[in-house]
Image (spheres, rainbow, N blue to C red):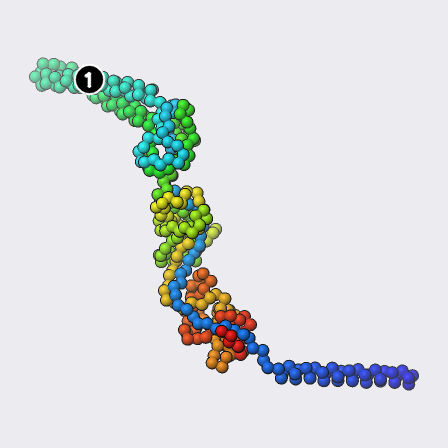
Amino acid sequence: MQRKKKIIISGLVLLIILIVVVYLRIRQNNSEISKRPPQITNVVLGKVSYGEMIQTESLTGDILPIQQANIYSKVSGNIEMVYVNIGDFVKDGQILALIDTTIYSQNANLANANYNQQLANFANAKLNYERNKSLLEQNLISKQEADNSKTSFDVAQSQKDAAYANYLNAKTLLSYCKIKAPFSGYITKRYFDAGVYVASSANSPGSTLFILMSSDQLKAIVNLPEKDVRLLPKVQDILVSADALPGEQFKAKINKVSEAVDLSTRTMQIEIFIENPNKELKPGMFANIEIILDRKNNVMILPNDVVQSDEKGNFVFVVKSDSSAHKSYVETGISHDNKYEIKSGISESDRIVITGQQLVKDGSKVRIIK
């Protein structure tokens, strides 16, 4: 029993000794750490620069023609001649194709002959009416005879007018045999060749002969985010580029604004006109659109990575004369091209940490290497 107690007491003594040794060792290490000089971070300093900052909104869209038309035939018949092909430039009013005029020419001649006949009948009825009117005034004929001549005159006049309308209609149908361009542009598609029978657009709306596009000026429909709608009146420039034309930029301007925000996308649709003086852009190309919403000159600028943030806001490290770095909270403005506009919080004379700032702590000493 006594032997067992001795073993327990010996174990407790050894445990106490071990605890004391560990404690003394920890104290020694802490003392050594506290005596070490604080670690100094190497940094590179710089100052704010001044320059231009622009606020942009980058959007995408498809390039579309200002004018596009599906060209149909207004009359049915065989295509006698086709004068244009894909890629041809045509002028407003230029003849694109000709429908066989045989039937329409005959109908016009027949209508003209009928009109001339009705015109002669009208002239005769008019002469007879005026003669009988004079005879009635002299009581040489009865009123019934005079009324009959007046009725014949009215009928002849109506028949003349109807014949003239039929003649004009026949002439119009004949003119429709010449299929003309409604505006100047390029033929982008051609669907029929000479000899093919085509139905009029009224009878067959799907019978497109050509597609005509104007490419002197193009347009794009884009959706502007709701947050930028208020800046629309301040839009200064719009630049358009296309992946198919690297390095090229084209000026554009706002043509129409929908004036309503889409509830599902929270965007407002706008239509822009794109200048295309050399016709390099083509309808159907994918467009990258940069809308310059705001432009400021001679403002303080810092690289984005120099500006850090915490729960209080954005800040930079400013190094004092004693080589200590301190947080200086700044108000930022426009962010563009990996740069911030600095509205307030620092001055142009401040020495700002531009490299190594991620390792710096507020109030710590730094070693300036540049």
Give the residue at x 30% y 19%: 106
Three-letter code for the amino acid on which mark 1 is drawn: Ala
Locate residue 346 relative to residue 152 in the image: left or right.
right
Give the residue at x 66% y 84%: 31
Give the residue at x 56% y 77%: 40
Q: Where is 53 relative to 65, above or below?
A: below
Q: Where is 180 relative to 13, above or below?
A: above
Q: Nearer the viewer, residue 215 or 104?
A: 215
Residue 202 place in picture, x, y as percent: 38, 29
Locate residue 174 relative to residue 367 in the image: left or right.
left
Q: Where is 4 relative to 306, above or below?
A: below
Q: Secondary structure at mark 1?
A: helix
Residue wearing tag 1: 120
Can residue 191 be seen at all in this image of the molecule?
yes
Locate residue 103 relative to residue 338 in the image: left or right.
left
Residue 301 place in picture, x, y as percent: 42, 67
The picture quadrant where one finds residue 32 is bottom right
Number of numbered discs overlaid on the protein picture: 1
Q: Residues within 10 Å of mark 1 (few under 14, many from 20)?
A: some
Quadrant showing the N terminus: bottom right
Give the residue at x 50% y 79%: 323
Can residue 328 be seen at all in this image of the molecule?
no
Q: Nearer the viewer, residue 243 or 93?
A: 243
Q: Nearer the viewer, residue 333 or 290?
A: 290
Residue 270 place in picture, x, y as percent: 39, 50
Residue 164 place in picture, x, y as percent: 25, 23
